[in-house]
Every structure is written in C-alpha cells, then in structure tokens.
Amino acid sequence: MSTPATSHVDPLFVPIFGESIELLRKVLLTKDAQPFVVAGSGTLGWDMMVNLIERDDEVLVVNTGYFGDHFGECLEVYGAKVTHLRAPIGSRPSLEDLEQVLTGKKYKMVTVTHVDTSTGVLADIKGVAKVVKSISPETIVVVDGVCSVGSEEIRFDEWNIDVVITASQKALGVPPGLGIVVTSQHAMQIFKSRKTPVASYYSNWNKWLPIMNAYEARKPAYFATPAVQLIYALHTSLKQITAQSMDSRFEQHHQVSQKFKNAITELGLKQLAVSDEVAANGMTAIWLPDGVQVSDIVPSLAAKGVQIAGGLHKECAAKYFRIGHMGISVTEPQRGHIDKVIESLATTLKELKSKA
Ligand SMILES: *Cc1c(COP(=O)(O)O)cnc(C)c1O
C-alpha cells in the first residue's frame, strides 16, 4: 500500500483489474455471474441490493444473528418489507420452517447469512437455495458471504445462488476497503426489468456494469475511481487462492477448524454453535468460562501477540469471544498461527483462573 499511487487507467493496472474479475468467478465456481468490485466495505454489498429491490417488495431474511438483523435493516431503508425467520442463538432455522414460510407468502428475495460472524453459525445455503427455487424459481437468493467466501464451500452455479456479497478483508485475505458482489444472470435480468429507477448514485449497477465490462475487456473506463492498490492486493490473493483447487481449500479450512474446535473442547470450553453441522469452518464463537470477562481475556491474549474479538450478539455480547481461523492462517501452516492461538489461550485461561 505504500507504493506510489498508480493511475486507474495505467496500462499495467487494466489487466490486473480485468483478471481479478475473472478470478472471482473461479473462486465462486460460476461461469457467467457478474462480479462488481467497488471501493467500500462488505456493507456496500448490502446497499447494492438497492438495485434489486423496489418499494414494498417482500424479503425474507434467514437470520442467525447480528448480521441478519442489520442486513434486514439495510433493506428496509430501500423500501423492502422484511420478515425475519429466526432461530435460537447458536442454531439456524430449519429447512422445514423455511419451506412453511415460503409456502405461505411470495417473496421477491430471500437472504441468508452464510456465516453469521456474531455466532459462528454456518447456514446451509445449498439447502436454502434448493428449497427457495423449488417453491419459487424467480425468487432471488442472496448470500451474505462476507465471512465465508474463501473459507466455506460455495458452488454458485451448481447450487443456484443469485447473489453473493463479500468483502476484501476476511477469508480473501486482503486489506479492508473493497466491497464485492457477484450476481447471477437471473438477478441481472430482474435488475434490468425493474419498473422504478435505482434510488442510489454510487451503488447503481447501471453505472458500474459498463466499468466492469470494460476492464474485463482490458480497457480502462471511469465512473468513480477504483481503489487501485487494493485491487492489486486482491489480484495477488485471488491468484494464490486459485493456484490450488477450491475443493482442497474448503477441505483445509474444514480440517483446521476441526482441530481448533477439538482443542477448545479439550480446554473445557463450549461453542455457541449447537452442533458440528451448524458450525462455521473459518471462525469459532466460544462461551467464556465462569468468572472470566471479555475485558480480561482480550488484553491477556493481545499481550501474547494474539488478537481476538469479544462477543457481538446483542443478547449475550459480554458472555463470549470469537476467534478467526481463515486464509493464510490455514493455508500456510508454517506460520504456526493456529498452534500459537491454542497455546496462548490455554496459558491465558490458566493465568486468569489462578487469579480468580
Ligand atoms: C464483516 C461482515 C459484514 C460487514 O462487512 P464490513 O466490511 O464490515 O462492512 C457483513 N456480513 C458479515 C457476515 C460479516 O461478517
């Protein structure tokens, strides 16, 4: 990032952007979905749903925590009528519940948080898309994959997904600053046949689509300045990710997650996720043991060089903590990240218990 500024029309940069767009399709296992890469954060992807939503459209949010609540809040800003399908903390709504809700009412869009970073709960996006499409093939299936793209299995075309929203800074392993949305041709058709204008300027796909098409054709174009250095970083990361098969990347994340979760269990700790099946592979949310506070464990681990996060779910934020295990921490075991975190956590818990 500390290199001299590069122009977005620099002949060396143009193919970097163009190839990044192509590589995103490889990461998501899609042939013809349309990527949008725009300066912003993951939240910009939520805002971009303004392109698919018109006033009073019905949207169902398959909700597993904080990020479902807030995605729903965002869609309401653009006039959607949002219904939440919820489950107790640590579990996810069943496909039977989903089927029942969908049979009762027609929804323009169903959103699902693939990994809700507040709970570490993994959604069954394959199952969700299958149920939605079997009842209502037109309904747009939107996956919030901010905490899952690059760490969880996603088969965009095979699973019939319409939109995946993500960001640069989680399992894609790039500094924060890029919002990334990948959209099926089905959703692009719905976008193109909307009746009312898109009520956003910066998020408007009518502005961005020609830009994405131009760079993919290896031609510069301008609507609003792209984050040139971040796109270089994205390109580097996508090249690394696609140097191996996506299947082996998914498997590596699964194995490291199992190892990490076993270590947590051996330390006598419990996860928020109620079963293996609903537990994310890129992170773990863990209940604090009795007598230990977030304000003790976070600085104690930070002093050992390990940065973890406290809780985020509004009903229990003070009672748990979260640890990410994704990207290079998983794919480059020689860094020793995972072992170091397990070791430091064990020492910290011993220290805090002896103080209590
Ligand atoms: C981090 C996150 C977001 C928000 O992304 P920002 O880049 O912080 O705007 C949205 N959804 C999920 C599931 C996330 O983990």
Image (cartoon, grey):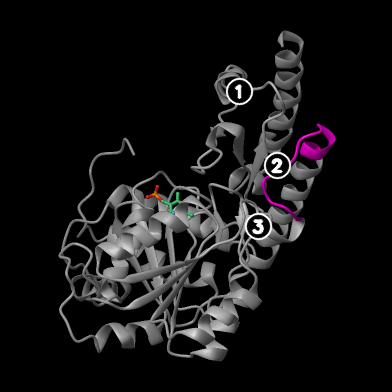
Residue drawn where x is 27% and y is 51% of the image: 227
Residue 159 as seen in the image, left or right of residue 188 = right
Tag 3 near tag 2, CB within 8 Å: no
Mark before the other along the chain sequence, 3 or 2: 3
- Image coords of residue 23 (percent x, y): 46, 67
Q: Identity of the amino acid at label 3?
A: Ser
Tag 3 near tag 1, CB within 8 Å: no
- Image coords of residue 206 (percent x, y): 20, 76
Residue drawn where x is 75% and y is 42% of the image: 260
Give the farthest residue toward the front: 104
Q: CA distance from mark 1 to mark 2?
A: 30 Å
Q: Give the structural element (helix, strand or loop) at label 2.
A: helix
Give the residue number, with chain letter if any, for mark 2: 333
Q: Which mark is residue 278?
A: none
Q: Which mark is residue 293?
A: 1
Q: Which mark is residue 91?
A: 3
User: Start and end of the magenta stretch?
Assistant: 263-275
Q: Main secondary structure of the magenta part?
A: loop
Q: Give the structural element (helix, strand or loop) at label 3.
A: loop
Residue 276 in sight here? yes
